[in-house]
Amino acid sequence: MRKEDKSTIIEQIAATVKEYGHFYLVDVTAMDAVATSALRRECFKAGIKLMLVKNTLLHKALETMEEDFSPLYACLKGTTAVMFCNTANVPAKLIKDKAQDGIPGLKAAYAEESFYIGADQLDTLVAIKSKNEVIADIVALLQSPAKNVISALQSGGNTLHGVLKTLGERPE
């Protein structure tokens, strides 16, 4: 491969890393063409960009970034595919659902501005809540006191005495 081609590929990888907020390094060494195609289809359905890369080119692309990705460098061995996604836990869920006998296996991940090294971190990555899930939790917490007041108003027969009695009897 010519040096100009390599520099173009490094720039493309670096641009993709900047575009997506999270990426996973996945070991696809033991996967055949059929399994790789199936994984690509599943990634496309889930909104994940799957890219098979040369380890040295990915290493050089990560070195050009402003952030320090040095914890990931040790994982760049064997056949590596990179899963890019804007939601941190989607690739982890896909790997957990589709992995058979550890294939494809998680090498490392960069999610929510943190590094996760090793396949044992998969459950931790699955448990990460997406932005929409966190917003839904916050909205539910904010609605809870209002729902308590409304239920107290409805159960007290809409009288002030009934409301005060209901609120007074309610455990804290």
Image: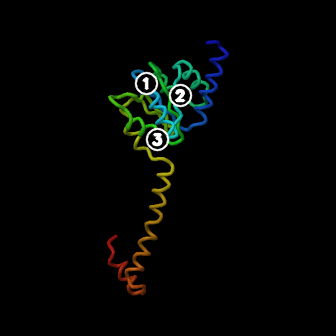
Three-letter amino acid code of the residue under disc 2: Met
Residue designated by label 1: 28
Residue 95 pos. (x, y %): 41, 35
Pointer 1 and pointer 3: residues touching (CB < 8 Å)? Answer: no
Measured in 3D between alpha carbons, the distance from the residue under mark 2 to the one under mark 3, in whole angstroms, is: 16 Å
What is the tally of numbered marks visible in this picture? 3
Q: Residue at x 50, y 32 (%)?
A: 83
Furthest-top residue in this view: 2
For label 2, the crowd category at 10 Å Cα-Cα, with few meaning under 14, some 14 to 19 and many 20 or more, is some
Query: Please, what secondary structure does the residue beneath circle 2 have?
Result: strand
Residue 23 pos. (x, y %): 51, 34
Q: Is residue 170 above or below residue 122?
A: below
For label 3, the crowd category at 10 Å Cα-Cα, with few meaning under 14, some 14 to 19 and many 20 or more, is many
Residue designated by label 2: 51
Q: Earlier in the sequence, mark 1 or mark 3?
A: 1
Residue designated by label 3: 90
Q: Residue at x 47, y 21 (%)?
A: 76
Q: Earlier in the sequence, mark 2 or mark 3?
A: 2
Pointer 2 and pointer 3: residues touching (CB < 8 Å)? Answer: no
Three-letter amino acid code of the residue under disc 1: Val
